[in-house]
Image: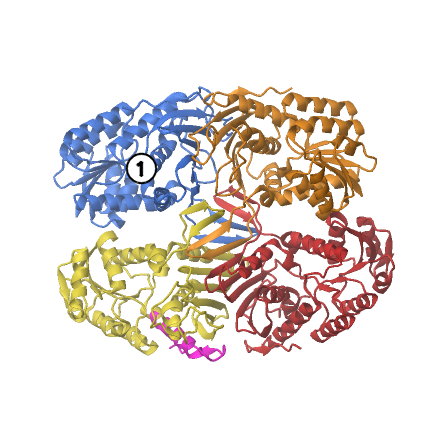
Chain colours: A red, B orange, C blue, D yellow
Amino acid sequence: MVNVGVIGAGLMGTTHARILAAAVSGADVVAISDPARESAERLAADVGVGVVYEDGIELIEANNVDAVVIASPAFTHEPFTLACLEAGKPVLCEKPLAVSADAALRIVEAERATGARRVTVGFMRRYDPSYVDLKAKLDAGVIGAPLLVHCAHRNPSVHSHFDSAMIITDSAVHEVDVTRWLLGEEIVRARVLAPRPTSRAAAGLLDPQLIVFETESGRLVDVEAFVTAGYGYDIRCEVVGEEGTLELLSPSTVAVRREFTESLVVPPNFQQRFGVAYLQELQSWIAAIARHDPFDGASAWDGYAAAAVCEAAVASLGRDGEPVDVAIG
Amino acid sequence: MVNVGVIGAGLMGTTHARILAAAVSGADVVAISDPARESAERLAADVGVGVVYEDGIELIEANNVDAVVIASPAFTHEPFTLACLEAGKPVLCEKPLAVSADAALRIVEAERATGARRVTVGFMRRYDPSYVDLKAKLDAGVIGAPLLVHCAHRNPSVHSHFDSAMIITDSAVHEVDVTRWLLGEEIVRARVLAPRPTSRAAAGLLDPQLIVFETESGRLVDVEAFVTAGYGYDIRCEVVGEEGTLELLSPSTVAVRREFTESLVVPPNFQQRFGVAYLQELQSWIAAIARHDPFDGASAWDGYAAAAVCEAAVASLGRDGEPVDVAIG
Amino acid sequence: MVNVGVIGAGLMGTTHARILAAAVSGADVVAISDPARESAERLAADVGVGVVYEDGIELIEANNVDAVVIASPAFTHEPFTLACLEAGKPVLCEKPLAVSADAALRIVEAERATGARRVTVGFMRRYDPSYVDLKAKLDAGVIGAPLLVHCAHRNPSVHSHFDSAMIITDSAVHEVDVTRWLLGEEIVRARVLAPRPTSRAAAGLLDPQLIVFETESGRLVDVEAFVTAGYGYDIRCEVVGEEGTLELLSPSTVAVRREFTESLVVPPNFQQRFGVAYLQELQSWIAAIARHDPFDGASAWDGYAAAAVCEAAVASLGRDGEPVDVAIG
Amino acid sequence: MVNVGVIGAGLMGTTHARILAAAVSGADVVAISDPARESAERLAADVGVGVVYEDGIELIEANNVDAVVIASPAFTHEPFTLACLEAGKPVLCEKPLAVSADAALRIVEAERATGARRVTVGFMRRYDPSYVDLKAKLDAGVIGAPLLVHCAHRNPSVHSHFDSAMIITDSAVHEVDVTRWLLGEEIVRARVLAPRPTSRAAAGLLDPQLIVFETESGRLVDVEAFVTAGYGYDIRCEVVGEEGTLELLSPSTVAVRREFTESLVVPPNFQQRFGVAYLQELQSWIAAIARHDPFDGASAWDGYAAAAVCEAAVASLGRDGEPVDVAIG
């Protein structure tokens, strides 16, 4: 049994703790931490955990904690991850790995210094059955060499504090990771084009955005990032290769015919779209820990590369599509 | 932790034991039994279990076994299930619950005598996300009152010992259970029509069959059961209601476009089509046991009713579509 | 230029006359007849025709009429078709060819006596691009030998005078023709099963019906005929063969994503679903006449066979699914 | 009857002449011209036309020619169109309207000088049922105000003389016209990004290309133009609005299930994909001429605007995505 401590009792911490407690074989949630003690206690009660901390560092250092999930605010990710490395404990850190590429690079280097791979970044799409199948077919050569990737990332709405940069760092970052993973190479340039914004967006928010990435070998990835799309949580990905294309399908369960339409559900939120991905990610992570195997999830390097690409894209904002090189070590 | 013993180390026992060991939270597989000791030992090693029995009764009575999965040949289901009842242990018995409706009824009565509900029949489709969503929408009144159900059950191929009756009792039995569950009422009559058989079927095998069921309230359910369909494992279900229809979708992950076609995968076997259903069934069962809650899976009565309906359908075979009443207690 | 006279200025006459006048190459509508002179005049004005008759026989005999479309009430089809044969003019008669199989057989025989094929029955589905493609693939052996056909014929609603027999003779008759055409053989038996009727149907109307046909070679065709289905005009057809299946698709033009659904339009009526089929049928018919070629549409025999099959099905109504043999000459 | 002369007996001239002769109501093809007399005679024989010219100007001036289709090489479009204007005859000119925006503008001005609208450019997609439906839904406000349009234009292959500029002027020009038409406004800037080319393309050919257009009001249109895509002729269009999205569907007729896949046909060429659009365009054009109504097809201005946009895109080629303003009068 792998004893897991969860840092952060907000939305993501709750999501992870519940899945770990109810649906992951071989895991035991043994501690929750949150500076808001009440939140921590509420979540602890919810998932049947006895021990609660206000300070994540205490949780990390607790003897009975074997592995740590970090789901606290982004600015805490670096110190908590470094503390996990120091404690020699596997850690699954929600994205972003750190608040800057530089900070993420420090984690990469700290991990390297330990000589072992213990850091995973929570890019859960790598465990979504549709993405997994798409990558398998791509790697099997079903469409020949890939040339282009078309992506869309649409949220129905976002909190009022969401700004134009966060559309890149919080939403499109998933496309950054997933296309790096699909194509097996780095993104080296980014540019952002912004059409006239939707009237549903807050004043000043550049939403939607059309982001274009270029990879080392000259492939192009275009991403529509649209966080106030209203109609649903809709993630699209089509890889265009020399012999054909592969298109990600959204999971559908039932076709409804009524009132002169045939319809499918568009998921309302990421939990519904990627619930299985979160479960698979956690189950695979726990199993790898139990077997003392390296984990195949996104590494610290992946977290760093994603941050560096996002920084380039953010720097391109408001520059009329002028490309910005990714500064990657 | 619920300690589970698995009776039977064949295909189904292996499927259940592996899922329980690798992917179900709160379960521990602690014992395997099979008269073929070597098979039991191989499976035990595979899933990390130390204790092996040749006799399922010993497994049932073992002190450290809290709950039992029966996946041995059909003729053993009755004695093993009764032994579980005697031992007061929850049991998940693969279908069929017993080799005859009469035998299944004895289990129903034995369970009733205990005053508690401990028997579950492994009609896993009740946990398939598509069927679950279909039932939710049906119950929510999305299509009004249901009138008809159209089903197809297609296997690519079957073992050479499969006979015409087994097409009903081994394949279409799933449609019997799932339509009883969807409609919330009993099937009272059955008739089987057989077209000229496919040339792919063994001599004498009536394959495909078109089976028509009638429910208490006069609804019709038609089932194409076709076990040498060749092209894939394809399960269909459309419920036609007064205001519209609901159609089960097969899970799809990626659309492939190449060579002038756009294509999706048709699953090759039941494991791929219903893998998630088996997992959900086992996870829900274990969670209910852990909480000492009654389990919402198919009951002994459901197993009995399905057997009685299948007996009527089998009796109708070769009678040119003449209906046979279901003898249900 | 083929000069066409249209008998009947109701819904079907109007449909045909408008298509002929506006969209068929090589055709000129030169005369309209209807006992309701005003209707005839209105349609004549609408499509730019100068000559109007009250009596269809006058139209048939008019010198400038080369070919005749019969779209008057069913009881007039026999005399008008016979008059066309007598006049030696090609005729496209809306289904049914006659009010009884016997009457239809008289037409078959009258045509045979002329030594030429001049009668076409308006089973327009044979010109629908989806059915045409399905038949081409079936004939090309894409799924091997066909074994079963599953059909559904759903109308949103019908006029209040529609009775249980008309569900067969007016609606399911299309499935009779199209499956005879697809399979290339006769239907020899029919049986009707009726579930409890929808509450949307008029009192006494057996709607929906589940009709099962058997062909000469032992194939089965099941048809759900449901004329008060409410949600749309929905026609389905799946042919199950030894190597796979072919499923008719409804034409779709645009996917709409809004309000957490992705939806397609279900056509509201037969004009929208089969508009292209009517056009293709008329264009092919006119082109064949102009070239003095035999026309490949449904023949008088097809009209007779469909009538005979429908009579067997009607005879089976209310007999609890007992099969009735088709009396075919 | 509108008497039509067709200039050009190559692929497009043949396509138009055949449709006009066989499937358009109210049209008569009365003359064909081609400097290659033999080609003209072959086509004339094929579609039943008696008169053949080597010189298109003679055809235009022929007394019995009411309307002209220009399907000769691009460099002849300007003089032939101007001759039609001089002769006061309606003309449907295949795209491009002329070899340069300047030349197209001369046609716009020449037509203006006549005081009547007689020039149509053959942007047939405006008559494709899917595009028509998409525009109708967009105009009806189904998705609110449009913000982005994503397009793909994929050909299986092209002739060896195709160069990088022609990918814009011959292929993507359709997306230019159709998005101007959908959005109801001008495109004012263009930029081209080119990933590493497919190994299937001839040396030096920048294929695929990712072209981004900006409209007057600040909307963005991205177009993947890929002329050696291999797998099929695949045209995509999704309009993203403030309340949802509209996605063009490719017409599909039959789903085939065999060998563990479910598949649809991807059309092999533009004739199959847009056959109905060509027919509808010609039928609408002829009907408008017969009624002396203005025709709602693409105007000379549309031809000019498309040329100007393509010139800007071509100028952007090889400039690493730097935008080029559209010089539009």
Answer whether residue D311 is magenta in the image. Answer: yes
Q: Which residues are magenta?
A: D303-329
Residue labelled with disc 1:
C123
- How packed mark 1 is, by other alpha carbons closer than 10 Å (few <14, some 14-19, many 20 or more), is many
What number of labels is visible?
A: 1
Q: What amino acid is labelled 1 in the image?
A: Phe
- Asked which secondary structure carries label 1, the reply is loop
Residue B128 lies, in percent from the top left, at 62, 42
C270 or B22: which is nearer to us?
A: B22
Residue C148 lies, in percent from the top left, at 42, 34
C90 or C34: which is nearer to us?
A: C90
Query: Which residue is situated farthest in the front direction here?
Result: B38
For the point 73% across and 29% down, which residue is it?
B80
Answer whether residue C32 is magenta in the image. Answer: no
For the point 50% across and 42% down, which residue is it?
A259
C294 or D304: which is nearer to us?
A: C294
Quadrant, the C terminus of chain C: top left
In the rendered image, the vertical position of residue B229 relative to residue A109, given as above or below: above
Residue A72 lies, in percent from the top left, at 77, 63
Residue C173 lies in quadrant: top left
Please, which chain is the residue tagged with disc 1 on? C
With A319 as the anchor, is D266 left or right in this view? left
Residue A302 lies in quadrant: bottom right
Residue D242 lies in quadrant: bottom right
With A249 as the anchor, is C316 left or right in this view? left
With C41 as the anchor, is B8 left or right in this view? right
In the rendered image, the vertical position of residue D260 relative to residue D140, given as above or below: above
Q: Is residue A105 visible?
A: yes
Residue A246 lies, in percent from the top left, at 51, 58
Q: Is residue B189 visible?
A: no
In the rendered image, the vertical position of residue D16 relative to residue B300, given as above or below: below
